[in-house]
Image: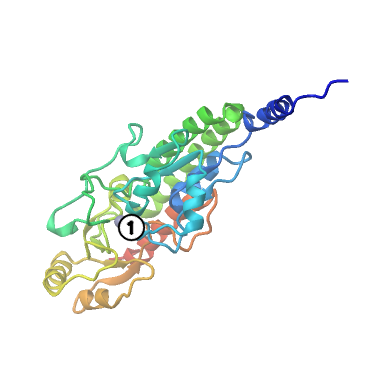
Amino acid sequence: MRRVPLFVLLLLCALLAAPAAADRHAPPNAVASILPLHALLAGVMQGVAEPALLIAPAQSPHKVALRPNQARRLAQADLFVWVGEELESGLRKAVSVLPTNAVVIRLGHDADVPVLPARDSAAWAPHHHDDDVGHGGIDPHLWLSPDQAARIASRMAEALIEIDPGHAPVYKANLERMVGRLDEVDALVEQRLAPIRGRPYLVFHDAYQYFERHYRLNAIGSVTIDADHAPGANRIAVLRRRIQESQAGCVFTEPHFEPRVVRILIEGSAAKIGELDPVGRDIEPGPEAYFELLDRLSTSLVSCLGPTP
Ligand SMILES: [Zn+2]
C-alpha cells in the first residue's frame, strides 16, 4: 500500500479549510469610529452581527490616539466607517495602512452624504480639529440631522450588501425600519423645538450646524475654536457684548468642560447655562443611541431656552 505524500495531505487540508474562510454568510467585521455612526451601523446590522465602536464615548474624537487594542480592532475590520481626518484626525495613519480588501467609508468625502462648509466668520470661531491637517473647509459634524442619518445608514447598508450579499434582505429590512424611526423622531423633535425656534443662543463649539439648519434654529455663535482650549480675554470681551446685545437666552457648554468661562460670559446678562453633547458621551452604545442623541439634544435646548422668553 502506497503512502499518501505529505504535500497531498497538506493540499487536502487547505481545500477543506478553504470553504470556511470564504463563507459568504460569515457576518462582516464592521467597525465605526464614534457613537452616533456606530448606532446607525448597529441598526443596519441588527440580527446579523454587532459592529465594534472604535472610539470610546468618553474619548474626544478630536484628540484620539489609538491604544494597541483599538489599533488591532481597526486592523481587522472588513468595513470601517468614519468621518475623515477633519474629525478623527488621529486615525488618519491607521486607516491609510488598512488592508486593501477592507471597505472604508469616509463620510466627509462620500458622494452620497452632502456636507456643509465650515463656518469661519468671527462669530463661529473656526474650528481646528488638528493643527497639521487643513480641514478642507467642510463641517465634519455631518451626522447631526435625521436626513443625514438616513443617508449615512443607506450608505452603510449598500456597503454591507456588497461585502455580505447573503444577508442583503436583512440589511434592506433594517434600513427601511430605521428610516421609518428617523422620520418619527424627526417629527417629534420638530414639534418639540417649535416654541424655541428663533430664540438666540450660543454653543460651546461649532458642532451643530446640520441640526440648526434642519430645525431652523437661531444659534448665533460659538464660544471657542477648540473644545479643549478656553477662549482668550479678547474673545471673552467680544462674546460678552454679543450675548448682551443679542439677548441670547442660553450659552451651552459641553460635558467634561470646566464651565467657569461660560459663567464669566453670562455675567450681567439674562442668559442661562445649558449643556449640549454632539457625540453622546453618556449614551449607552447600540442601535437606539442615535435616536437618544437627537432626543437629548432637543430636550436640552428646550429646557434651557423655553418655554417663555
Ligand atoms: Zn467638533
Along the viewing direction, whichever of 95 and 241 lies nearer the viewer = 95
Residue 50 at x, y percent in the picture: 59, 46
- Compared across the picture, whether 173 is left or right of 179 comes to right
Q: Is residue 98 above or below residue 160?
A: below
Residue on which the image places disc 1: 62
The residue at 67%/27% (across/down) is 19
* Residue 144 is at least partly visible in this image: no
Q: Is mark 1 within 8 Å of ligand 1?
A: yes
Q: Which colouring convention does the figure follow?
A: rainbow
Along the viewing direction, whichever of 180 and 16 lies nearer the viewer = 16
User: Mark 1 Cα within 10 Å, few/some/many (few <14, many 20+)?
Assistant: some
Image quarter hosting the N terminus: top right
Along the viewing direction, whichever of 40 and 163 lies nearer the viewer = 163
Dividing the image into four quarters, tell me where ligand 1 lies: bottom left
Residue 126 at x, y percent in the picture: 19, 56
Image quarter hosting the C terminus: bottom left
Q: Is residue 293 above or below residue 228?
A: above
- Compared across the picture, whether 262 is left or right of 303 comes to left
Q: Is residue 231 above or below residue 82?
A: below
- Compared across the picture, whether 101 is left or right of 237 comes to right
Residue 284 at x, y percent in the picture: 53, 58
